Amino acid sequence: MNNDLRRMDIQYLTGVGPKRAELLRKELGIATFHDLIYYFPFRYVDRSTIHHINEIDGDMPYIQLRGRFVTFNAVGEGAKRRLQALFTDGTGTIEVVWFNRVRSIQETYRTGVEYLLFGKPSLFQNHYNIVHPEVDVYKPETAPQGLQGVYSLTEKLLNRQITTRTMQRLVGNLIKTPAVQQVAETLPRQLLAQRNLMPLSQALVNMHTPASIRDLQRAQFRMKYEELFFLQLNILKYIKGREERRVGFVFAHVGDCFNNFYNHVLAFPLTGAQKRVIREMRCDMGSGRQMNRLLQGDVGSGKTIVAFMTTLIALDNGYQACIMAPTEILATQHHETISEMASKIGVSVALLTGSTRKSERERIHQQLLSGELQILIGTHALIEDVVQFRNLGLAVIDEQHRFGVAQRAKLWRKNSTPPHVLVMTATPIPRTLAMTVYGDLDVSVIDELPPGRKPVTTIMRYDKDREAMYHFVGQQLRQGRQAYIVYPLIEENEKLDLRALEEGFEIVQETFPSYRVAMVHGRMKPAEKDHQMELFASHQAHILVATTVIEVGVNVPNASVMVIENAERFGLSQLHQLRGRVGRGADQSYCILMTKYQLSAETRHRLEVMTQTNDGFRVAEEDMKLRGPGDMDGTQQSGVAFNLRVANLAQDGQIVQLTRDDAQAYLDHDPDLATPEGQQLDRHLRTIFDKQQSWSEIS
């Protein structure tokens, strides 16, 4: 019956017709009965209460008033024409305003008739008004009661008279059809009983027209559970299939490269967390299955050394390794760090980027094919078809969210047997998101900073404190430290932002005349940008004025101050990444968030989180709560194309875990989904996921 809903064209629903159907399809993607029944309200309003005008205050959400229009008055001409009306309920008056359909509204409503008015009050020039309210003639027997859904609509739909009221009417017509009343259950009977879930047909109705708050909550739980259960079932089914299909190289032993480095070259002890993740990777690579592991570690937690030691295990087993980074600066930095360590144990390392000379490229290609070159570090240049390895055994991808799925998949095809894969990120990903977005990856976390690293002190300052901020930066410079000053650069405001950056650069030069100031932004030519970065990295420049191009990829242990201008314009994860540029040496470091005084409550909370914690995972959790998982850095390129209608990975962590456990238990009992119930689950899975991105390329 669910497939019947998918096959039923929305134009044949009572109240739609061909023209409305075309609008609904174009504006909301609603083409079938199924699309409409799953187009849930984004919030609900209680129509059981009637308020009085003299009770209205600024914090009220949508309210319902009962009274009469006193006057109507059309004001303005052409596009600026609007209709103003005065409405009273005996306790006071409120202005009502319409900007559209002025003539038809004037002809529809009358003074002296009793109406129900429903809308959101707002304060304008010290008086409350309601713009574009819903208006009904008041009839006690038909007055709206209880909870009603409010639907997300576009301006074009509203202009064509498709309002929330229209949607409520259409959904009401749909709910009465046998196709909805007899909709087939999608979940196994024992799960419905075990989790006390509302039946699907009942849940769909209560998502739109709940009889009570409790019914709405039960319906929402049922729909969230279903959404997440099928998502987890799909991931777990794929993992099982991949483990059966994907053979990996067996790295059977740890030999001279690893042991010589660990025993004679490594200048500091590894943290317990670093040792743990190396053990996890060694276990993966010795298992005979292809390793697919995500390594998370906050900025400065020592991921690079772990990645290098993992490449040494590949070398000890006769294989080559590569490390791919998203920018030339980061690739060059990895090359400098790793080649210095590798030279001490006789391991050959090369760097391949877009600016590598032709003669050097040819030498690298020859040495790769002969096996003489053991570790290749580079940018996207690594995935070009011309780059061929003799036997690539391990691919490490740094800041992996910056590479698209198709780009990453090209690396796996460098061998007939895909190499082991280690993907690394300094963007902490909350557990529920990692479990779902990177659900097919095993996750390792370096949750411990090396000894001697001091947490960065983060403080918030307003524009009026600018002089004190510059005084503090001056103190740090006099102690021989360096400072970053970062400006936002947003595409929509690019010209204005660049002007602000350049003005800021001039002010900093005037404020610190005895210090050299460098400047970088994304619009510079790469050579000039690299030159400016190099001035700062080599301590020839004392201050770097920059946009977020420095978010990833410049390591200057001597820099102890990060000033972030207009900090309110940055997301939490981005602020945390920027803060990670300081605190890399043994000295106490500082991050100063400069902001305007007037901030919204949400923005103030976001900035306060930064001042309260250095824990990247807590920052990421808060970021996900504020912005939702779809905005998390990189998840859009992760290859996961699911669209959650009801569940929220930030708020529904417990349901994510519950459905993960239930999906795993079901697969343990019916691994191939071969029972009649399992086949039904499999069919539903294919209906949901077949059109979406193949999970087989995610890593």
Image (spheres, rainbow, N blue to C red):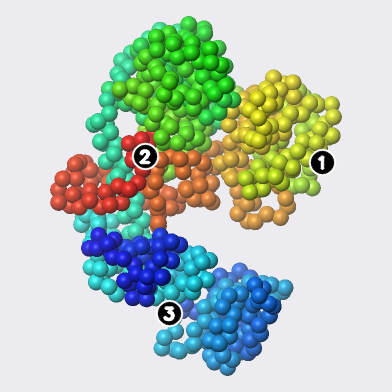
| Quadrant into which the N terminus falls | bottom left
| Element marked by disc 1 | helix
Q: Position of residue 160 (x, y in %)?
A: 49, 72
Cα distance between the residues tagged 1 and 2: 49 Å
Q: What residue is disc 2 on?
A: 439
Can residue 52 be seen from the camera position used here?
Answer: no
Q: Position of residue 454 (x, y in %)?
A: 62, 29
104 w.r.t. 500: above or below: below
645 w.r.t. 236: above or below: below
Cα distance between the residues tagged 2 and 3: 44 Å
Residue at 35% x, 12% y is: 317
Question: How many numbered circles are shown?
Answer: 3
**C-beta proximity under 8 Å, tags 1 and 3:** no
Q: Position of residue 469 (x, y in %)?
A: 77, 39
Of 636 and 477, nearer the camera is 636
Numbered badge on residue 467: 1
Numbered badge on residue 58: none
Amino acid type, residue under disc 2 in the picture? Gly
Q: Position of residue 232 (x, y in %)?
A: 32, 45
Amino acid type, residue under disc 1 in the picture? Glu
Q: What residue is disc 3 on?
A: 145
Of 467 and 193, nearer the camera is 467
For mark 1, does the 10 Å Cα neighbourhood hold few (<14), some (14 to 19), or many (20 or more) residues? few
| Element marked by disc 3 | loop
